[in-house]
Amino acid sequence: MFTGSTKLPPTKTPQPERLDEVYAALRRGLQSYLQVHQLELDSLGQQIRENKRNGRLGSLYELDKQVKAIERFMRRLDFHLSKVEELYDAYCIQRRLRDGASKMVAAFNSATGSREARESLSEANKGYRECTEHMCSLESEIESQMGEFHVKMKGLAGFARLCAGDQYEVLMRYGRQRWRLRGRVEVSNKQIWDSEEYVFLPLITELLSIKVTELKSLANHVVVGSVSCEMLDLFCPLPQTLAVDINDLGTVKLNLEVTWRCCSLQHTPLIASFVCLFVTLLTLCPVFLSLFQSV
């Protein structure tokens, strides 16, 4: 997981083979999200049955609210998955049309230079360009449905390599997205960084590039190592703690925690509980309602 890899080719044309890999990982991640929330639903259902059986009715209202919140999120998630599948199906259709147009172009190029052949070649080239544009557009649409990667800095691990007073710079590049952070090692071996979290938008054709530099003085910087990392394994419903080998020997590692948020509206039980409490106060307390309206 999260191993080094070679840089992918720049995106000047559609990348159908790469999209197949990304789609498989994205679809698998969305299905895992649904499974995790289904397990949460099953657990809440068990709690509700036990509370009813034991006569503990006070918490049923809150449990029911949690169940409804999860069910709403799962419906939204299921719709999100269906939309991704629909976009991928449309992409596959355009891919087949483009392959057909490519074969026609090759056939007409090898034909005699008659007027009809030239006209047919022009139409085939036009169809090929249109399919290419549609595929690029669909790649962008699928990319917009891939959610967010929330990356937290957990520090460097270097065994005997890290010493008190050492200062480091970490630069992460992901397409046009960049996260540059600096940190130092304290006497207690605690590390202090000027930035702790960053949000990357997933990309289809890019790898995450990481470069770690030791800052010895203003004019003396030593590159500890750099690596390019695949992101496909990060489409996972649960946070993942990663240790990335920065140098060839693996003596310096970068520790990160990555949380994938599959869509903009995540299921947040604590926020839902706060809203329920707020509505209850407005309903049951006329004084509170009048104060709220006056504000």
Image (cartoon, rainbow, N blue to C red):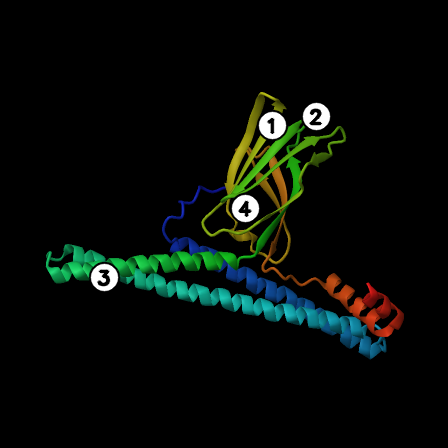
SS label for mark 3: helix
Q: What amino acid is at disc 4?
A: Phe
Q: Name the residue beneath numbered marker 1.
A: 214
Give above or below for 275 relative to 200: below
Quadrant assignment, res 250: top right
Disc 1 or disc 3, which is closer to the eye? 3
Q: CA distance from mark 2 to mark 1?
A: 11 Å
User: First in sequence: mark 4 or mark 1?
Assistant: 4
Image point 39% across, 53% down: which residue?
15
- Where residue 147 sits in the image (x, y, percent)? 56, 57
Position of 11 compared to 200: left or right? left
User: First in sequence: mark 1 or mark 3?
Assistant: 3
Q: Name the residue beneath numbered marker 4.
A: 2
Residue 216 visible in the current orientation: yes
Disc 3 or disc 4, which is closer to the eye? 3
SS label for mark 1: strand
Q: What amino acid is at disc 1?
A: Glu
Position of 115 compared to 250: left or right? left
Image point 36% across, 66% down: which residue?
93
Mark 1 neighbour density, 10 Å: few (under 14) some (14–19) many (20 or more)? some
Q: CA distance from mark 4 to mark 1?
A: 23 Å
Instruction: Residue at the far front: name it.
Output: 294
User: First in sequence: mark 4 or mark 2?
Assistant: 4
- Label pair 4/1, CB-CB below 8 angstroms: no
Disc 4 or disc 1, which is closer to the eye? 1
- Where residue 253 sits in the image (x, y, percent)? 60, 37
Q: Name the residue beneath numbered marker 3.
A: 123
Q: CA distance from mark 3 to mark 2?
A: 67 Å
Q: Name the residue beneath numbered marker 2.
A: 165
Q: CA distance from mark 4 to mark 2?
A: 30 Å
Q: CA distance from mark 1 to mark 3?
A: 58 Å
Position of 8 compared to 123: left or right? right
